[in-house]
Image: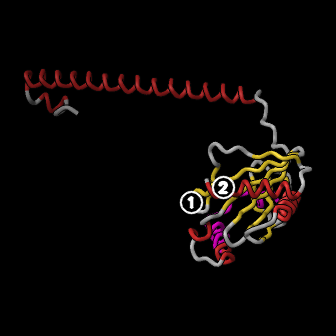
Amino acid sequence: MPEGNGLAGSRRGAAGSGTLWRRLRAWLGERREEDQSASHLSAAEASRERAIEQIRARVLRERRFEDEPPPPVPHKEATILAYRAFTRILSHAVYGSAHADPRGYDERHPSKMLNADLGREARAALAASRFITPEHPEWERLMRFRTDEEFRAAEAREMAHAGVKTRKALYQGAGSVSLSLQDGRIELAPWRYAGRGAWEGIPGIQSTILPESVSDAELGAAINAALEKSRNA
């Protein structure tokens, strides 16, 4: 508010009233400009919100006509983890990703395995793998990623079985190969150790594709060759 009001200004005479009036008019002009600026800002914001809503509505309309991505093709997966102390072979519950399956194949074998033995056990793990769809009663329990606590507990069990006390000692010289069975073909992919118990793909290394009818000895030889690539990556 400006200084005083009409009553207070009247006690200051004609000159004071004129000054007060000019101040009042000036203040009213400033408020009018502020109101107009706020009005323009509100209008701009409202226009932007309308544009966003229009874009959102258009995207939703377009998505209604898009084809849903096809579900994963049924397949089976297994993993070979070759530590210095032992070789662990396990099957997975799979859909879009692979997860541990308590009802699957999970066995520990000697660190060095003959080709025929390795191929036979790898084939058994693939046969035990289960393709789990969202309608499966075990979906919520199986198709999830482990918590940090679960991962550390599983790693501690591996260290105890290997007779070591550190993660570094467990993974030193280790190799990992994933196997996938789909449409009568077995795909083998070596992985390199990425630290902290994780594995990653090896740039420049192609997967090995074998027919499902391959002999146990041939399958084991391919796995052993892939394990060497994994260890040396």
Q: Callout 1: few (<14), some (14-19), or many (20+) C-alpha neighbours within 10 Å? A: few
Q: Which residue is mark 1?
A: 195
Q: Is residue 178 magenta?
A: no
**Camera-side residue: 82 or 217?**
217
Mark 1 residue type: Gly
- Examine the image and state in which quarter residue 218 appears: bottom right
Report the predominant secondary structure element of the magenta stretch: helix
The stretch of residues the image draws in magenta is 138-156
Q: Point out residue 171 in the picture as x, y percentages from the top left corner.
A: 61, 66
Residue 47's place in the image compared with 226, above or below, is above
Q: Point out residue 195 in the picture as x, y percentages from the top left corner.
A: 56, 60
Residue 216's place in the image compared with 67, above or below, is below
Q: Which residue is mark 2?
A: 230
Q: Point out residue 74 in the picture as x, y percentages from the top left corner.
A: 86, 47
Q: Is residue 137 visible?
A: no
**Looking at the image, is mark 1 or mark 2 earlier in the sequence?**
1
Q: Horizontal placement of 68 versus 10: left or right?
A: right
* Residue under the image location 64 percent in, 70 percent down: 155
**Camera-side residue: 181 or 65?**
181
What is the total number of numbered labels drawn onto the structure image? 2
Q: Horizontal placement of 110 versus 20: left or right?
A: right
